[in-house]
Image (cartoon, rainbow, N blue to C red):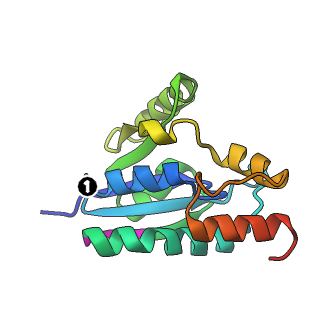
Amino acid sequence: MADRIGLYPGTFDPITNGHIDIITRAARLVDRLVIGIAVNTGKGPIFELDERVALVEAEVRPIAEKTGIVLDVRPFSTLLIHFAREVGAKVIVRGLRAVSDFDYEFQMAGMNYRLDSGIETVFLMASESHQFISSRFVKDIAAFGGDISSFVPKLTCEKTMAKLKGEA
């Protein structure tokens, strides 16, 4: 039987504790999870693509070691459904924080299904303690010198603060 491969795509600029929560939970549902790092220059990322890939790899390594699941972090700059096919994913994992996320994600899932009905989208609700966290809020708080340590993993916190201070 073939491995069940899932794809969790995002910009991850920066990766948050909410992302880590979804990755940890998605890892229980599949045999291999590809974490797709989108180029997405339209969002004005603070980290370059290679920096985001390296940071996500470092932050998810403990999850892979603890669960034994293969977590493969890969950048992509194509249509999501094309990337899903490329990596052999049959499931796209999307995290939902609030009702406002659902409208957009529902439309995207419908479009992806029309493009390839063999790839399902699975929604995971953010855990209660992470429902309000977004990369955008983390960047905004950090840019004004606020404490982001409860929203992101330790290494990500250090790298984000250094980047915004011009030290990285």
Q: Say whether residue 49 is visible.
A: no
Q: Say whether residue 41 is visible.
A: yes
What amino acid is labelled 1 in the image?
Arg
**Mark 1 element type:** loop
The magenta segment is 68-72
Q: Is residue 160 magenta?
A: no
Is residue 132 toward the left or the right of residue 157 in the image?
left
Vertical position of residue 59 compared to residue 19: above or below: below
Question: Residue 159, image x and y in percent?
Answer: 70, 71
Question: Residue 37, image x and y in percent?
Answer: 57, 61
Is residue 128 toward the left or the right of residue 48 in the image?
left
Q: How many marks?
A: 1
Q: Which residue is mark 1?
A: 28
139 or 51: nearer the eye?
Answer: 139
51 or 118: nearer the eye?
Answer: 51
Is residue 42 toward the left or the right of residue 114 in the image?
right
Question: Residue 146, image x and y in percent?
Answer: 77, 51
> What residue lies at 51% left-to-right and 34% top-to-bottom?
97
Residue 148 found in image quarter:
bottom right
Question: Residue 8, image x and y in percent?
Answer: 45, 53
Vertical position of residue 156 compared to residue 20: above or below: below
> What residue lies at 41% left-to-right and 55% top-to-bottom?
23
Q: Main secondary structure of the magenta part?
A: strand
Q: How dense is the environment of label 1, judged by Cα within 10 Å: few (below 14), some, or many (20 and up)?
A: few
> What residue lies at 62% left-to-right and 66% top-to-bottom?
156
The C terminus, quarter of image: bottom right
163 or 141: nearer the eye?
Answer: 141
Residue with the most extreme left position? 1
Is residue 116 toward the left or the right of residue 142 in the image?
left
The N terminus, quarter of image: bottom left
> What residue lies at 65% left-to-right and 64% top-to-bottom?
157
Q: Is residue 70 magenta?
A: yes
